[in-house]
Amino acid sequence: MYKLAQYQESAAYLRERLEGFAPETLLILGSGLGFLAEEIINPIRVSYSNIPHMRASTAPGHAGCFVAGVFEGKNVLAMQGRLHLYEGYAPEETAFPVRVAHLIGVSKLLLTCACGGVNMDYKVGDLVLMTDYINFTHPGLLAGYAGNSFDLTGFEHRFFDMGQAFDMEYRSLSREIAAQIKIPLREGVYFYMTGPQYETPAEIRAIRILGGDLVGMSAVHETLMARRCGMRVAGFGLVTNMAAGVLDQPLSEEEVLTEAKNAAPRFSALVRGVVRGM
C-alpha cells in the first residue's frame, strides 16, 4: 500500500517536468483511444516509467505516457493508456495516477474506455455515456486501510459517498454536446470485470440480469480514487465489440483496436465538446 509521501514524491516529479504548466482536467484514454492525446497543443510528454512509484502500462494500444498541454482551450493532462489489474497490479496501483494528478491541482476527470456491449440494443461503434457502475469482482482500492490515525495515505475519513460516481452536470453537458454535433449517445451502466480473458456467455447473461449495459476491464478504480479525492468525473465507453454470446463470433483485441480507430472522428468530437464545457 502506498504512503502519502510516495504520492507526494511522484507529484513533485511530475510538477517539475511540467515546468509551471497547471492542468485542470485529467483525460484517461483507453484501448485504441490514445490518438486524442496527439491533438493536444504544445504537448509535454512524461513517460510513466520515469515517474517514481508509478507502474508501467503493458496493454496493447496503451502508450504509457502522460501528455500535458492545451486541448480545446483548457489545460489538460492526458493519460495515453492506463493501468489494469490484469497486468498484475493492485487496485491502488491502477488508480495511482489519479491521486498524483489531483496533488498537482487537477480537479476534473474525463475517462474513456473500450467496452463490450451487453445491452442487446447496442451495436458496435456506439458511444455510451456512463451513468453508474457495478463492481462485484474485487475489493475497493481502499480496502484494508485502518482509517484515520493509522491511514498513511493522507485521507482523513475512511467512508465516502458514491451516490454520484459520474457527475450529473457533466452527464447533462454530454447530452447537449452530442445533440449539437448530431452524434448518437447511448447511456448505460458499466460492469467491471478484471480480465484479461473475455467473459463467458453465461457471465454476460448474468451481467445483463444484474443491470449492466457495458462490460470492461478498467475505469472503476480510477473513478473511486477520483471521487475519494473530491474530483468530478465524466465517463464514456466505446462499444468495440458485442459481448460474448451476443454474436456468433470469437472476441479479439484486434477487433477492439480496429473499432476504436473507426470511431475516432466521432469520439474526438464528443470529447472535445465536453472538455470545452467542463
Image (cartoon, grey):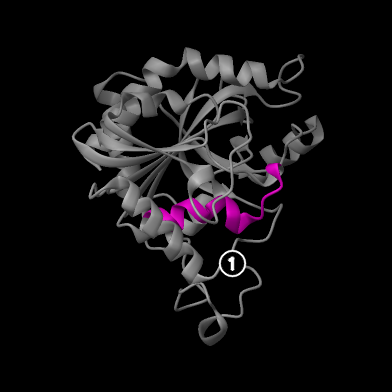
Within 10 Å of the Cα at label 1, are there few (<14), some (14-19), or many (20+) other Cα atoms?
Answer: some
- Front-most of 43 and 25? 43
Position of the C terminus, as image quadrant, is top left
Find residue 49 and report its image quarter. Answer: top right
- Front-most of 52 and 109? 52
State whether residue 164 appears in this view: no
Is 259 situated left or right of 45 in this image? right
Find residue 122 and report its image quarter. Answer: top right
Which residue is outermost to the bottom? 149
- Front-most of 64 and 187? 64
Residue at figure coordinates x 61%, y 40% from the top left: 212
Is 83 situated left or right of 181 in this image? right
- Front-most of 130 and 113? 113
Relative to 97, does residue 238 appear above or below in the rendering?
Answer: above
Position of the N terminus, as image quadrant, is bottom right
Q: Is residue 91 magenta?
A: yes
Residue flagged by tag 1: what amino acid is it?
A: Leu
At which x and y percent is residue 109? Answer: 38, 47
State whether residue 266 appears in this view: yes
Find residue 255 and report its image quarter. Answer: top right
Relative to 152, does residue 268 appear above or below in the rendering?
Answer: above
- Classified by dominant secondary structure, the portion drawn in magenta counts as helix
At which x and y percent is residue 195? Answer: 72, 39
Residue at figure coordinates x 67%, y 47% from the top left: 85
Q: Secondary structure at mark 1?
A: loop
Q: Is residue 40 magenta?
A: no
At which x and y percent is residue 221? Answer: 56, 53
User: What stretch of residues is rendered in magenta?
Assistant: 87-101
Residue at figure coordinates x 58%, y 19% from the top left: 257
Is 236 situated left or right of 57 in this image? left
Is 245 situated left or right of 257 in this image? right
Q: Which residue is mark 1?
A: 142
